[in-house]
Amino acid sequence: MTHDALVAVARAVFEAAGGTPVDPDYVLPADIPLELSGEAVRARLCVFTDNRGAEMAMRPDLTLPVAQREAARLEAGPSAKTYTYAARAFRLPAAADDPFEFTQVGLERFGYAADPSADAELFALVHRAVEACGVQPKAIVTGDLAIFPAFIDALGLPAVTTDLLKRAFRQEGGVRAVLDAASRPLDADILAALNAAEPETALAAVLAARDVPLVGARSLAEIVEGLRARRAAIEAGGLPDGARTALLALREVDCSLAEAADKLAALAKAHGLAGADAALGAFASRSEKILALVPGARRSAEFRAGFGRRFTYYDGFVFEVLADGLLPAQPVAAGGRYDGLIAGLSGGKVSATGIGGVVRPDRMVRVRRTRT
């Protein structure tokens, strides 16, 4: 099938699930994707300055502009709503053979019950769209961005340490960096920079003197904020060895989805983390429902405790579908839950649950071509 034919097939699957077709704004204020994208995506944003001098960005996905539109609609009154689309997104390529401009076909649901059944049904719908396009998943990577915070809360650490760890979890390698540095005080020149009248300028000088480049897309302001949080956590007593051991063990969980609930429950029990039971119960229920709706996932789906940071607006179940002939950074489909996104976009004026998923017809064309 051609690219356009695959778009039509995938769109038909999502439209059959109900929803209003939409093609939202192509251009967003740059602060929206900059604040809500993980470092890997942030470095690939298409940012420019408009004729008024405002920094703008081409939409890097469809979830953000659809959610922005939904946040504005909800100010007139709450009601559940489903949207479908087959529309263009813009990101610098993840790999040499990826396009700068590509079509996402997907569905977004706002304001419905946020429960394991809803997560499983969305996952099954996206999986159905992939199969309808004639592509069999090679692997399905899943995660749950509620599990790590639940473990952290159950540890009973000081608030500043809890906040530091949760912030670190949203960054690639952040948890390992915090755990490795938990018992090590900040260097004198770093502390002096944080205490300076202009800490960002002072820190830039320290990094330059150490010949340390600014890696990825984190700003100096974000680095200063992170260092201040680490200093506060150290002053609050740092991270106990038991907590460090538990979080390191959680970070290493990488297994089949069918095994994951038991492994996580055993880990929580071993470290006395009864406070994580609610999150683990929801996880187990979702996994059971996914495997019932998509029996093939028992063979192809895996769970990684550290997975799911490309867009930081996700806050629950996340997944990516991988296929033969493409890199791990090139999923043919992806999705997840983002219950806090509407509140974040509206500045807390309104809130609504959210979940969505997309497929990439351009990548599925390449997968199908490699089979012929």
Image: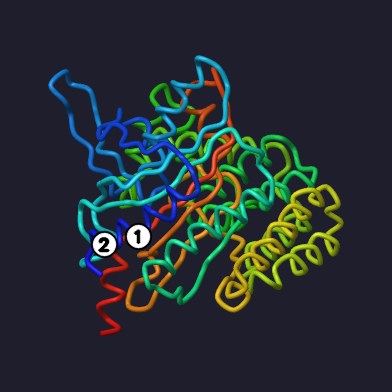
Please give the name of the residue rendered at 65% of the width and 41% of the height, measured from the top-left corner.
114
Residue at point 24% right, 57% down? 93
The disc at residue 9 is: 1
Q: Secondary structure at mark 2?
A: helix
Identity of the residue drawn at 55% across and 53% down: 122
Q: Is residue 47 above or below residue 327?
A: above
Distance from label 1 to label 2 (Cα)?
Answer: 6 Å
| Amino acid type at mark 1 | Val
**Along the viewing direction, whichever of 27 and 268 lies nearer the viewer:** 27
Most foreground residue, 197 or 305 = 305
Locate residue 232 relative to residue 134 in the image: left or right: right
Residue 243 image offset from top left, x and y in percent: 75, 54
Q: Label 1: state its secondary structure.
A: helix
Give the labeled residue for mark 2: 5
**Vertical placement of 220 versus 169: above or below?**
above
The answer to whether mark 1 and mark 2 are in CB contact below 8 A is: yes
